[in-house]
Amino acid sequence: MEKSIFQIINHKLTYFHFEKNKNFQKKGTISLDVKGDTQISKDKQKNIAIVTFTLSLFKDFPIDEVPFFTELQMEGTFKWVAEVKEEHLKELLHMNAPAILLSYMRPFISQVTTYAGYPPLILPLMDFTKKKT
């Protein structure tokens, strides 16, 4: 095992919104609605990029139909070695970076849902090779 050519320098939560449906009554199984969006700003001369990943749960549903709505945004600064080819860098920034940021969001969501009185929500692993997240 060795250190990756792609590293996260820092990360921070830049936005958070949580709205609980106080009148929610569970009726059968609830399918988790997960949406994600990635924004990338890179400085190729410094081999650094700021990647912003926005995660939304139940975004496309009225609040009276779901237990809650939440949206959060995490920003990470990533660096890479100069020898990375452009196509590989694109994969790292569009797939690896949001997956890394999601790993920091996962325990946050679990705790917030617990504090809201729900069982802890453990976000599923997401496949960032697919366009829809």
Image (cartoon, rainbow, N blue to C red):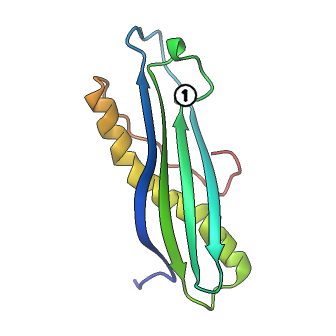
Residues 34 and 70: in front is 70
Residue lying furthest bottom: 83
Question: Measured along the vertical axis of the image, is residue 41 above or below residue 45?
Answer: above
Image label count: 1
Mark 1: few, some, or many residues within 10 Å (few <14, many ≥20)? some
- Judging depth in this view, the residue of 116 and 133 nearest the camera is 116
Residue 85 locus on image (x, y percent): 69, 84
Q: Quadrant of residue 49?
A: bottom right
The residue at 53%/43% (across/down) is 55
Q: Residue at x 59, y 45 (%)?
A: 36
| Quadrant in which residue 58 is drawn | top right
Residue 18 x/y as whole percent:
42, 30
Question: Could you tell me the amino acid type at mark 1?
Answer: Phe
In the rendered view, would you say 2 is above or below 65?
below
* Residue 92: percent from left, percent from top: 60, 70
Which sits in the foreground, 39 or 132? 39
Residue at point 41% right, 85% down?
A: 2
Which residue is depicted at the point 34% across and 39% down?
Answer: 110
- The quadrant of the image that shows the N terminus is bottom left
Residue, disc 1 = 58
Q: Quadrant of the C terminus?
A: top right
Q: Is residue 63 left or right of residue 92?
A: left
The residue tagged with tag 1: helix, strand or loop?
loop
Front-most of residues 10 and 110 = 10
Q: Position of residue 44 (x, y in %)?
A: 65, 82
